[in-house]
Image: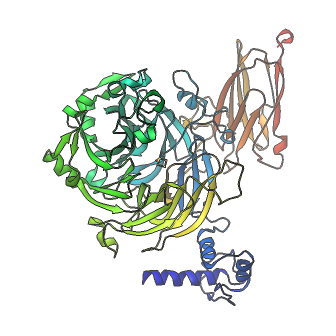
Amino acid sequence: MKRVLAVMVGILMIGFLLLPGCGGGESDGGDAKPVARTTNGNGLGGDAAQVAKDRDLTPDDVVAALKTYMPTGRHDPYIMFASGGHSGQVFVIGVPSMRLLRVIGVFTPEPWQGWGYGIGNEILADGAIDGHELTWGDTHHPALSETGGDYDGQFCFINDKANARVAVIDLRDFETKQIVNNPIALNDHGGTMVTPDSEWIIEGGQYGSPLAGEYAPIDEYNESFKGMVTLWKFDRKKGRIDPSKSFAMELPPYWQDLFDAGKKVSEGWIFGNSFNTELATGAKEIGDTSFFEAGVSQRDNDYLHIINLKKAVQVYEAGKVEKIKGMPVISLDTALAEELLYFAPEPKSPHGVDVTPGGEYLVVSGKLDPHVTIYSFDKIQEAIAAKNWTKEQYGVPVLDFDAVVEAQVEVGLGPLHTQFDDKGYAYTSLFLVPAVARWTLGGNYSDLHDEADWELIQQANCHYNIGHLVAAEGDTVSPDGKFLVALNKWSIDRFFPTGPLLPQNFQLMDIDNTGDDIKLLYDMPIGIGEPHYAQIIKADKLDPWKVYPEIGWDPVAQRVDINAPQPGRERIERNGSTVEIYMTAVRSHFVPEHVTVREGDHVIWHITNVETAQDATHGFALPVFNVNLSLEPGETGTFEFTADKAGTYSYYCSEFCSALHLEMTGYFFVEPKQQASR
Ligand code: CUK
Ligand code: CUA
């Protein structure tokens, strides 16, 4: 019935929007009669029928277009935060229009925002490892901050798989505030995921390695190589991770993969999947049996990691840790003695573990098994209480599979990640089909749907080779459903071929329906890195600043900088060979417009954008010295350099801010040493 209604409403909407004179106007006028003028074979009226015919659009195409089209000025109801993969950034995308709203500079310098070109330089520098400056990251899993298990719209966290780093983005201004390096790991993967109140940010490792990146030969793999999970303490008030209150736990050198935090009934626990239980060491040529790809895929089961976080925090706070490069680490022996860690078998080379909205079940996919396996948190607790386990080679209790599994659903080949909606459905990406599998949850979720429990309902094709998928609010205790985005790795024939390197493909799907009715709505090519995961939040949960709160705002400290240049107090101060410039920017000039220093001077340059009008951003571009700021209204920025090359440098505003933007310029003179007279 619901579906018939939805279809009828759809037809009425189309008819209404296609009325002559109504196209593009506000559609909430009320009394116009939604009747199509004439219809063709597509069931469309008038001009729309002609456009559809000329463009060879099917009725489904037209409906998809109407469901995603945003008239100018209208805002998307959802906002997606997607990892930027190798770009090292985070993408902000409107849903359902799939319009790219912003690329947030995180691990990689980003010139439009001045990120790394005068702004954020210290934060990027904090991300250096042992003095090695890093100018990229491999971002995988953004996590929106949560309160009570729901996205609260305050922060976004993101990991860098390539270097085991975690960043914090403040969603008041959508800018990166912190990058922390994990001192005990050189790559990560199971991050970032947050506990239901964002107290802890989870960062799990990936490839087993000696802790802290020490050297060890491969034939010492079993003893010297380790796995790990790190719990970063988040200080919400400061908007920063507090490394001094963070800790890690040593794990066996299986390759930990994805983590998820328990919620509601399972709050206080965290779960991770793993692969390479085989302890394969790769490299056929040195006499091992096979390459990694075969070596790590020999066994039928790997281990779901089940960690009592609440108890682990107590153990850490009781000081039962060893410090490795300053990071408190609960050793594996301590973890076992304190009963913090359990395993459960998981088939086969799994990828990802996802906790259901109520926290009752954990869903694990085996890449090489066509099933998803659903574990019951209650049954896990019972098995732990009954000591229903055997121990594996490192002494970790392995719970009995049959005792803890609630159900298995055959969803299709190559299952990876799972999301949830409000209708009792789960959605699992099928890399090999490739498709999105919709299947029904049982247990507490049975009442939400009319179908049988734990059953595959539909495989909706996607193009191609889907990795993650994301549903609106799909990681929260109260998912919305409505829209789902498939994050596809290959795009092959979907777009004009841009040479041999093709974009990834985000495919928006309509899941606001029941049964086998998932519909593809839109393709969005991503041509700047391979996103892995994304999260979608209701737009009205976000409350970003329109301009900075006060003139002279330092976005790093999130308060007024007492040194910020203020209008009427612009000046140049010399102190020995250090010259400090206090400059303001307003449409359409800088004050001062001439700045003169001597060759070899150290220059500290402050600029405040004194505008209060929304979108009145000024840039500041200075040649040779690699400076380009983006100063949003109210923002102040400071950069330093040594004026080591005499010359005449014209600086200019690099944002087209006004009719006289081209005139927003000035000269920076560096007097040659021998001529310097002032
Ligand atoms: S991973 Cu990329 S598709 Cu890093 Cu979450 Cu599964
Ligand atoms: Cu300021 Cu252009």
The quadrant of the rendered image in which ligand 2 is seen is: top right
Q: Quadrant of the N terminus?
A: bottom left
From this view, report whether residue 557 is shown above or below residue 34.
above
Q: Residue 344 or 233: which is nearer the viewer?
A: 344
- Residue 570 falls in image quadrant: top right
Query: Could you tell me which residue is drawn at 53 percent across and 30 percent down?
Result: 127
* Residue 279 showing in the rendered view: yes
Whole-percent x, y for residue 231 in the image: 36, 36
- Which of the two residues, 9 or 348, is positioned nearer the viewer here? 348
Residue under the image location 49 percent in, 70 percent down? 518
Percent x, y of residue 319 = 26, 26
Residue 613 drawn at (x, y percent): 68, 50
- Total marks shown come to 0
Looking at the picture, does residue 267 appear above or below residue 248?
below
When asked about the image quadrant of residue 79, the answer is bottom right
Q: Residue at x 56, y 52 (%)?
A: 489
Q: Residue furthest top?
A: 674
Residue 217: image location, x then y, percent: 41, 21
Q: Residue furthest right?
A: 675
- Is 258 positioned to the left or the right of 133 in the image? left
Residue 547 appearing in the image = no
- Residue 219 relative to residue 4: left or right: left
Identify the image's colour scheme: rainbow, by chain, secondary structure or one colour.
rainbow
Closer to us: 548 or 45: 45
- Quarter in which the C terminus is drawn: top right
Residue that sits furthest to the left in the current view: 386
**For residue 120, side relative to residue 330 (left or right):** right
